[in-house]
Image (tube, rainbow, N blue to C red):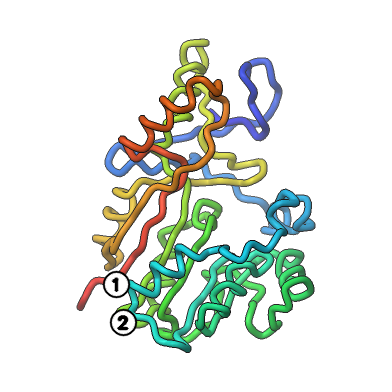
Amino acid sequence: MRLNKSQGSKPKQKIGIGVTVCKCRECGLIFPSPLPKPNSISDHYGVPPESYWSNRYFQIDPGYFEKQIKDAKKLIGFTDGMCALDVGAGIGKCMVALEAAGFECWGIEPSEPFRQKAIERLNIAEDRIALASIEDAKFDDLQFDFITFGAVLEHLYDPAAAIEKSLKLLKKGGVIQIEVPSSDWLIPVFVNRFFSLCGTSYVTNLSPMHPPYHLHEFTEKSFKTHGKRAGYEIAQSYIDICSIPHVPALLKPMFRYWMEKARSDMQLTVWLRKSEL
């Protein structure tokens, strides 16, 4: 079970709405069942960007998205003017980085406040950032060389459909880059074990009904399994080393070692390429 709020160390003492959290025994995908959906996407994301992200997010780092752009260029054999699509563009930071790197970039963002902030603060052209979801976006088939989902797929109600729509928009030889929470992350394993020892069925995975509204956690096998049906392969993947919350400083080096050895850190990045017909 997962509550619709922060659970703390004693979730049984809190009052809230709970939803069952499941894990696929075949591929490791973690998801809520039933899937809670708001009446409108604005119920979750129709908020001022400042209330969704910390102040640090609005600082423009010259190296933002640098590693991902370097990998994309290598995988697609980049030439100036290739087309990129940023799915869930937020306030437009990734679009700015892609344009500076030589891409012709478009974006889609379903949150009106986020899109407006991209136009006002980062000078994104209105005709380059559509107010739409990936499912409803209007682009030509085979339009893009590179499509990126940065911290987006875990928020979507049907991530499989979003990938399949993106494959239609992707040119031959293009790639889709996806950053998602890993369901192999070591920290929730220990937190969930603690909850179990306390005699509860609560878990710390996901946040289906409160910010940041994560609905899914993935493994590399999740994508391999879906790729067999949808027609793509994993060109490359890696685990990003992130911070280690809820662990005493003395134990963090040990946890870091385990997570690096077992590829069990928080964020999984996969690069998908269409299967050859």
Q: CB under 8 Å between callouts 2 and 1?
A: yes
Residue farthest top in this picture? 198
Q: Residue at x 38, y 73 (%)?
A: 167
Check disc 2 and give the amino acid type: Lys
Going by the image, does 244 lie left or right of 93? left
Q: Position of residue 198 (x, y in %)?
A: 52, 11
Most foreground residue, 77 or 89: 77
Give the amino acid type for the residue marked by disc 1 in the picture: Lys
Q: Which dot marks residue 274?
A: 1
Relative to 48, is 238 on the left or the right? left
In the displayed structure, 66 sits above or below 250; it is: below
Q: Which residue is mark 2?
A: 172
Q: Residue at x 46, y 46 (%)?
A: 267
In which quadrant of the rendered image does the C terminus lie? Answer: bottom left
Q: Nearer the viewer, residue 24 or 212?
A: 212
Earlier-in-chain disc, 2 versus 1: 2
Residue at the image point whose x is 30% and y is 37% from the top = 25
Crowding near the residue tagged with mark 2, few <14, some 14–19, many ≥20 C-alpha atoms within 10 Å: some
Helix, strand or loop at disc 2? strand
Q: Which image quadrant is residue 172 in?
A: bottom left
The x, y position of residue 96, in whole percent, is 62, 74
Q: Secondary structure at mark 1?
A: strand
Query: Residue 32: x percent and y percent?
Result: 50, 40
Question: Real-space Cα distance between discs 2 and 1?
Answer: 7 Å
Location of residue 189 with respect to 274 vertically, above or below? above
Residue 21 % position (x, y): 48, 34
Instruction: Judge whether 182 appears above or below 229 on screen.
Output: above
Q: What label does residue 225 carry, if any?
A: none
